[in-house]
Image (tube, rainbow, N blue to C red):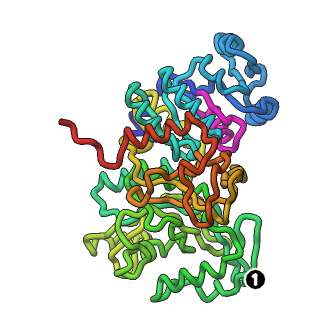
Amino acid sequence: MNLHHLFAATQGRSVRYALSGAGGGFARTLLAQTLRTEALQPSVLCDRDLASLRAMLGELGYDTTDLVDCADASDVARARSEGRIALVADGALLGAGDWDILVEATGSPVHGCAMAEEALRTGRHVAMVSKEVDSVAGLHLAELAEREGLVYTTADGDQPANLIGLVTWAQLLGLDIVAVGKSSEYDLVFDPEQGTVTQLDTTVPAPELGALLTLGDDVPGTLKARAEAVSALPQGATADYCEMAVVATNTGFKPDTERLHYPVARIAELADIYRLREDGGVLRRDGAVDVFSALRLPGEASFAGGVFVIVRTGDTVTWETLRGKGHVVSRDGGYAAVYLPYHLMGVETPLSLLSAVLHHRPSGGTDPRGHAVLAGRARLDLPAGTVLGMGGHHHDVTGVQAVLLRDEDSPDDVAPLYLAAHTTLARPVAAGELLRLGDLADADPDLTRAWTAGRAARPVTPAVQS
């Protein structure tokens, strides 16, 4: 994206957006930044708890006299005719407002898909924040947007869009990409004096890490020992798998293993870890998408949930020059890591909204395909009648381990993880088995249709036109 041209296009123009899940954390960051983005205006904000939404908007500095609680479509139309912001608790009322693009941030597969589909069918663009929706219905929504001449895009500021953008940049430069990925949400902070490791607000003993702060010659062995040292802390969040599914769909990079590698790694080690096995790294093949847990000492800079690409270096002199400037190059000089140590959530999302509406360009991939499937394996024997609830910060599914399957390893009847969310099992599923479509007694029919239609419309190998 040429940011100068995008900035020029905003002069004297305004982009209006609707926002679902408007009371959530991501939404707050976007609403806060909107106050500082002259070319952007909120039109209709949807959240179940309007009182809390109104209070949050007041905290951010919105004029509360400009906020109107709306119970029906006529209320929404009236509020917008007066230039005020309509607040609605029912997503079905979003369409009554005047806006250009929907920011879908509910995290609800069923409701998010329905709102995105309705937006596209009524001539509005969609910026998808809800990775849960994208992992099931993204191909269908992308196909629908293309047919309608609209933009369906991931949202800048979230890790999938940031990583897709970094991959596109590297490909444009002709870099030989071996792997792409991101760090998990929370760093592992090792305190050598105390012999403890802290992840967010949890601290556990991990004195063994003191002797494992360098990789040594046996990279897999060191990584195994580190994983054992921090095993008391959770690793492998469902949200990470979901985000990498979105990246795989939009880039063609695939998981090297269905549980991902999740190495406990220091930033300076990435180019040594994400090498092929024959070169001493962990990868079985090129083209991997993965996640690592960032290990650092107190006071060291965080990776901040950022994103990376691993490339083969090519000219030795060039990359030794870059090593000297502080870039991460493997010890043998054959690989390098290029990374962005940040994701700013909704603070960056205005770029996606302005680009989609003013330039008709997505922030994400332009030809998403079913390269990988976010699926689930039963953690334990699940009897028929089990309700697969979805909840928690990472939207885990009850009794199910998220896995990321390569398309060629995915059974035709595999159930995407978030189609299974909130469903009831029609039959028993043994521990370790994949969830299949036939296992779900009451999957939402519209979401099921979106899944099957998207996979059919956008196969990995596009049909040859005669």
Q: Residue at x 52, y 54 (%)?
A: 374
Q: Residue at x 65, y 39 (%)?
A: 106
Q: Residue at x 69, y 18 (%)?
A: 84
Give above or below for 411 relative to 465. Answer: below
Residue 30 visible in the picture? yes
Q: Quadrant of the C terminus?
A: top left
Q: Nearer the viewer, residue 400 or 334?
A: 400
Q: Which residues are magenta?
A: 18-37
Q: Residue 46: x percent and y percent?
A: 68, 29
Please state which amino acid type lies under the numbered disc 1: Gln
Give above or below for 32 relative to 286. Answer: above
Q: Quadrant of the N terminus?
A: top left
**Residue 2 painted magenta:** no
Give above or below for 260 relative to 448. Answer: below
Residue 347 visible in the picture? no
Q: Can you tell which quarter of the image residue 133 is in?
A: top right
Q: Residue at x 27, y 57 (%)?
A: 174
Q: Residue 82: x percent and y percent?
A: 67, 11
Q: Residue 103: x percent and y percent?
A: 57, 34
> Of helix, strand and loop, which one carries label 1?
loop
Q: How many marks?
A: 1
Q: Residues within 10 Å of mark 1 (few under 14, many from 20)?
A: few
Q: Residue furthest left?
A: 466
Query: Mark 1 highlights which residue?
Result: 194
Q: Residue 230: x percent and y percent?
A: 66, 77
Q: Can you tell which quarter of the image residue 184 is in?
A: bottom right
